[in-house]
Amino acid sequence: MLKKAKWLVIILAIIVVTNFVPLTVRANSRTPIVVGSKSFAESKTVSEIYALALEQVGYKVIRKPNIANSVVYRVVKTGQVDVYPEYTGTIVETYLKKNGSGLTAQQMARIARKGVQKDGLVTFKYAPGDDRQGIGMRSSVAKKYHIKTISDLQKNAAKIRFVSQGEFDKRADALPGMNKKYGKFNFKSLRDYDDSLKYTIMAEGKGDAAPVSTTEGQLATSKYVLLKDDKSLWPPYNLVPLANKKSAKEHPKMAAALDRVDAKLTTKQLINLNKQVMVQGKNYRMVALNWYKQNMR
């Protein structure tokens, strides 16, 4: 009788243990995924596309847009946010403090992926969309002086009013880097403005060229042109999901869902998304939803 009781206790213990693990996994899989974004249009729009993709595969999603650049890496590291759209170049140069100059997109992505592991983070596949540093110009001025490349800009700098921001004038990879790589830029004038005003200043005819991100929506209009970085000063900044590794394991469909999205986010697609939000004034969530319906279903 005692032996039977002993075996009964053992069997019950086995049942409890074997049932406990699956319940834990199921609970974790039901935990909402917190999808964050930085505070600019592209990040918010792509973040919303990520959220839609995760909901499509059955996850509950909490949206946390407009996270400050200074804290976004930390909040995903600590698990307050599970995933957000980042850039390989930002990870390498800003978070890992490495020089990305001369690296290919693949090399940049590999360094980013390995570098974030120490912080309990993981990157998924990077998108073909590349939002790197660049120089944009008023099309009319570029046409007048036959400026198509940054080398052309350097040769004609004395005729160009440069619309800058204070940090661009000092950063090693910005204007000082341009001077080193292309030769001294002796602009007709160089004035600092808030970055959000650069297109207004140029539209009003008070400036001719400015630092830009290469996927900004205004570059899709006929008013502005992106100059070719013909000496490859600036490295690739491909869009890539940056996720908390623990959360990625708890939500096994996360990586595949976001990889599927990123495969279709080309530079041209990002420019078009930004044009709708930044130029046409559309709501980023509606822009993201329309893109998702057209491209992912």
Image (cartoon, rainbow, N blue to C red):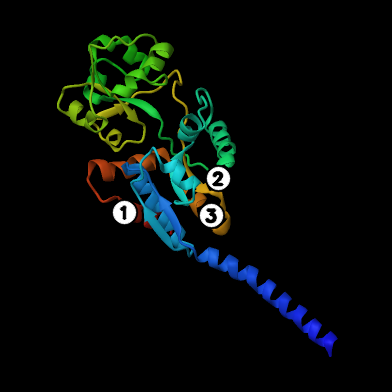
Residue drawn at (64%, 68%) of the image: 21
- Residue 50 showing in the rendered view: no
Q: Residue sitting at 26 percent across and 41 percent down?
A: 278
Residue 230 in sight: yes
Q: Position of residue 215 (x, y in %)?
A: 36, 36
Quadrant including the N terminus:
bottom right
Above or below for 10 versus 109: below
Q: Dividing the picture into quarters, in which one does residue 72 lie? A: top left
Q: Amino acid at mark 1?
A: Arg
Q: Amino acid at mark 2?
A: Val
Which residue is disc 3 drawn over? 247
Look at the numbered discs 3 and 1 and tell me whether their residues touch, using CB distance below 8 Å: no
Residue in view at x 75 percent, y 81 percent: 9
Residue marked by disc 2: 122
Residue 163: image quadrant is: top left
Is 110 placed left or right of 230 in the picture?
right
Measuring from the top left, give residue 71's x and y in whole percent.
Answer: 40, 41
Circle 1: is it few (<14), some (14-19), or many (20+) Cα within 10 Å? some
Residue 29 image point, x, y percent: 53, 64
* Amino acid at the residue labelled 3: Ser
